Amino acid sequence: MKKINHIINGAEVATTSGRTSPVYNPATGETTAEVGLATVEEVDRAVAAAHAAFPEWQATSLARRTTIMYRFRDLVDQHKDEIAAQLTAEHGKVISDSLGEVKRGIENIEYACGLTEHLKGSFSQEVSTDIDVYSIRQPLGVVAGITPFNFPSMVPMWMFPNAIATGNTFVLKPSEKDPSVNSIVAELLSEAGLPDGVFNIVQGDKVAVDRLLEHPDVAAISFVGSTPIARYVYMTGTGAGKRVQALGGAKNHMVVLPDADIGLAADAAVSAGYGSAGERCMAISVVVAVGSSADPLVEAIEERIPGLVVGAGNDSASQMGPLITGEHRDRVASFVENASGEGATVVVDGTDQDFQGDGFFLAPSLIDNVSPGMACYDQEIFGPVLTVVRVDTYDEALKLISDNAFGNGTAIFTRDGGAARRFQIDVDAGMVGINVPVPVPVGYYSFGGWGDSLFGNSHAYGPEGISFYTKAKVITSRWPDPSSSVIDLGFPQNV
């Protein structure tokens, strides 16, 4: 059985806890590896390695750091097929989704390569007689990332490239469900020239999370995951005096107005709702059909579902793979099984489709006539289930989104530019798509929602990522003219 270990100070370290967690191939149900779960002492060892590496890394020139980041970017690109194959083997998503994940991760590495620009300060000369004022940004020290199973490569790349480029050292606690890909990443960072101790991995569960949250030498925590855990991470981390960016769950709505291109909207709903088996925090979960769009839209989505090929992620014919575990598949299926009893209409029942073998497959489902108060509406499903809520007007659609606790992403489909412009201003969500179903920002913007989708005020990656991993310092300096016969070192008089 393959053993997945920590990586501390550049070396593999096996756990001494005696506790392990299984890692599956979701397409077969087979246990392919065991990941060792960290003790408190092993977390402390990783933090100590990062703490020891920090002074020298902070003092490393911007030119040297930039060179390493460019090398790392090129190595990830060269090994993208290997990384994607590992993603598919442990997560289950189809290869095209895995490659897309790696490429989106590369975007964030490329942004970090611009650190010489990102770390520029400002300078004001002669604000008073012989007085200059300028600002600089400095790293925080040891920072940590706690990342989810659904994007085991990309989400860590939202964090550590910016953190490391700005002079911090990093401890990653990946999901124990699909952790292997980050071992490949660690090897590539080392090959790029990153010194030992700057990037460390601790495999683990709540024991590791809690220790990172309370450790006095960890200055900041970045988290992506479910809303209950995001709230816990934020409250615990900030209570311990740390900076915390905590991104939570989602219930993304896609509004379809009567004037929309129904074919385009249906294609978008299918790809955004069922892509990666719906295990995406930006997946469309709720289609809000306004007025006369409802019947043709539901029919168009229903017509497209049989053409969606569900199978093993490494099969080139597959368009949707399995879910991450059998337990999660059963949870998702329960929302479909209970929908009729709550008054909804199950148009396509994916739980009726049988699959050979022991893989964690679940076919796409479509549920119509959904309303708030139903479990399939109120809760984050995180699987291949699309729900349809019918409303009469644009204002009703807007209120539906505003009343929802989540505010991660949303989209509108329309031919009306005025309606689209009004929507982007009025809607309560952090990321908005106009005829774009999954509006994930490119690497030089920042990712984050509103409401229960974000705790604190710091979004991930991009400019806000640079700000999160650095602290500002303002210097006021006085260098009197040496020809002056009197040197007054008091506060400037000639303002």
Image (cartoon, grey):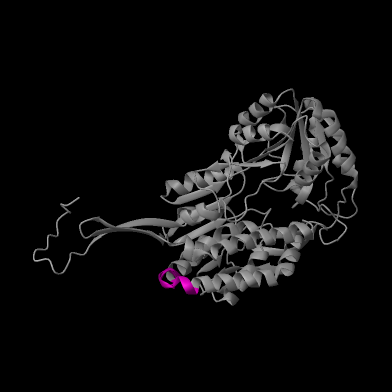
- Judge whether 472 appears above or below 193 on screen: above
Taking 141 as reference, is 224 above or below it?
above
- Residue at the spot x=65%, y=31% of the render? 401
Q: Nearer the viewer, residue 237 or 195?
A: 195
- Quarter of the rendering containing residue 216: bottom left
Question: Which one is in front, 229 or 111?
Answer: 111
Q: Is residue 227 left or right of residue 392?
A: left
Q: Residue drawn 87% across and 48% down?
A: 308
Q: Give the prevailing secondary structure in the magenta stretch.
A: helix
Q: Which residues are magenta?
A: 53-64
Choose between 348 and 207: the one closer to the eye. 348
- Picture quadrant of residue 461: bottom right
Instruction: Return the x and y of residue 258 as percentages of the image width and height.
Output: 78, 29
In the rendered view, would you say 404 is above or below 409? above
Q: Position of residue 231 (x, y in %)?
A: 54, 42
Q: Is residue 81 magenta?
A: no
Q: Could you tell me residue 409's position as x and y percent? A: 64, 41
Compared across the picture, whether 55 is left or right of 311 comes to left
Tell me if residue 61 is in the magenta stretch. Answer: yes
User: Residue 241, relative to residue 197: is it above or below?
Assistant: above
Camera sees residue 39 = no
| Residue 171 image offset from top left, x and y in percent | 53, 62
